[in-house]
Image (spheres, rainbow, N blue to C red):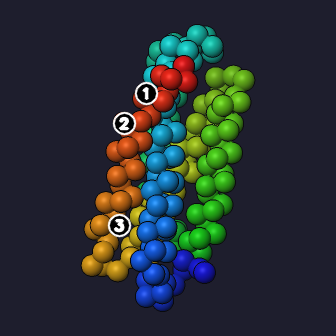
Amino acid sequence: MSIQSPSALSRSLSPKRELWLLLTLAGIQFTHILDFMIMMPLGPQFTQIFAITDAQFGMLVSAYTLAAGVSGLLAATYLDKFDRKKLLLALYVLFGLATLACGLAPTYDSLMLARVLAGIFGGVLSALSQTIIADVIPFERRGRAMGIVMTSFSVSTVAGVPLGLFLA
């Protein structure tokens, strides 16, 4: 099934498939925001491990957010040219690889590069999730659908800091 044809797909989704789609998009949104939030409580560990200043650590956090914001805005102009499902899968794999690269980064510079890449892919994923909702969910249920997906944003911001502290 392709997510490219909005009118045909919105008519063909059963309530169960619609819920699974929304939960999938919510999971993607959750991991994207969690990837950002989990860094914040790890500042003392990162400054010690990489022998960096607090300002350099702040740049690690900011680089992700800036990359996500810019990529999300830029991607909005190009998302309509691609098959939504394939793009979502490809971007999520790239996001996962960039996040893995963050965990395996041996130097500050490599961590910064991996954070920027994770932010770029995460920002596009966020924009793409909203686009998919607009494409496949009928107008009457779109507010509820957005609410389900955006709830994951709130949950990840609440869960991210304690999870980061637990891991630290």
Residue 113 x, y percent position in the rendering = 63, 35
Q: Please, what is the three-letter code of the amino acid marked with disc 1?
A: Pro
Disc 2 vs disc 3: Cβ atoms closer than 8 Å?
A: no
Instruction: Determine the secondary structure under disc 2.
Output: helix
User: Of the residues under marks 2 and 3, which one precedes in the sequence?
Assistant: 3
Query: Looking at the image, which residue is at 57% across and 51% down?
Result: 121
Residue 30 x, y percent position in the rendering = 46, 48
Q: Which quadrant, please, contains the C terminus?
A: top right
Which residue is tagged 3? Answer: 145
Which residue is tagged 2? Answer: 158
Spatial CA distance of label 2 from label 3 is 21 Å
Q: Please, what is the three-letter code of the amino acid marked with disc 3?
A: Ala
Count neighbours of disc 2 (C-alpha within 10 A) and say few if under 14, some if 14 to 19, many if 20 or more: few
Spatial CA distance of label 2 from label 1 is 8 Å
Circle count: 3
Up-down: is 63 above or below 80? Answer: above
Query: Looking at the image, which residue is at 51% across and 61% down?
Result: 24
User: Of the residues under marks 1 and 3, which one precedes in the sequence?
Assistant: 3
Is residue 58 shown to the viewer in this render?
Answer: no
Residue 162 is labelled as 1
Q: Please, what is the three-letter code of the amino acid marked with disc 2?
A: Val
Instruction: Determine the secondary structure under disc 1.
Output: helix
Residue 160 x, y percent position in the rendering = 44, 34
Q: Which quadrant, please, contains the N terminus?
A: bottom right
Residue 11 x, y percent position in the rendering = 43, 88
Query: Looking at the image, which residue is at 34% across and 63% down?
Result: 146
